[in-house]
Image (cartoon, rainbow, N blue to C red):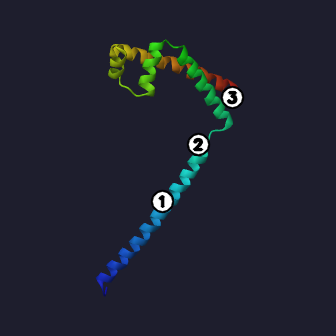
Amino acid sequence: MESPRALLFKAAHHLCINLGRHDKLVLEWLQDRSQQAAHNSVPSAEQQAAQRQLLMRLVAHLESMPARRRDVFLLFRVYGYSRDEIAQRLSITPSAVAKHVVRATVDCAVIFSEVRQAWLEDAA
């Protein structure tokens, strides 16, 4: 080894080249993945119709719920208020808020179950 300094600079040069190649490869991979995700994220017309149907059933069910239960559920699940904030806002106890959230969640789970069962029957 005639010049350790020259060897060090040559090694550093090769490391920079390899890092540049790696960064380019990662960038190309990320771009490819984002294009695939964008392509795969577009639901088919059938999926859109099924989602619309589910949404309509949920909205109809929410409208048929008792007003207090619906308000508590929407404040908790949609707007992200805490139980204490909802209790204070609606002048009820935090345990009443919890009961309303549980009942509304169970009601919505029943709707999801019914729709899922209908989809499975349609697919068969």
Q: Residues within 10 Å of mark 1 (few under 14, many from 20)?
A: few
Q: Which residue is mark 3?
A: 123
Image coords of residue 33 (percent x, y): 54, 52
Q: Is residue 124 visible?
A: no
For discs 2 and 3, the disc positioned in front in the rendered view: 2
The answer to which of marks 1 and 2 sits earlier in the sequence is 1
Residue type, mark 1 in image:
Val
Label 2: state its secondary structure.
loop
State which quarter of the image contains the N terminus: bottom left
Identity of the residue drawn at 53% across and 56% down: 31
Q: Is residue 84 visible?
A: yes
Q: Residues within 10 Å of mark 2 (few under 14, many from 20)?
A: few
Tell me the tag on residue 40: none
Image coords of residue 63 (percent x, y): 54, 17
- Alpha-carbon span between mark 1 and mark 3: 40 Å
Identity of the residue drawn at 58% across and 47% down: 38
For discs 1 and 3, the disc positioned in front in the rendered view: 1
Residue type, mark 2 in image:
Ser
For discs 1 and 2, the disc positioned in front in the rendered view: 2
Q: Looking at the image, which is closer to me, 9 or 69?
A: 69
The answer to which of marks 2 and 3 sits earlier in the sequence is 2
Contact flag, marks 2 and 3 (Cβ < 8 Å): no
The answer to which of marks 1 and 3 sits earlier in the sequence is 1
Identity of the residue drawn at 69% across and 28% down: 123
Residue type, mark 3 in image:
Ala
Label 3: state its secondary structure.
helix
Q: Quadrant of residue 56?
A: top right
Label 1: state its secondary structure.
helix
Q: Which residue is mark 2?
A: 41
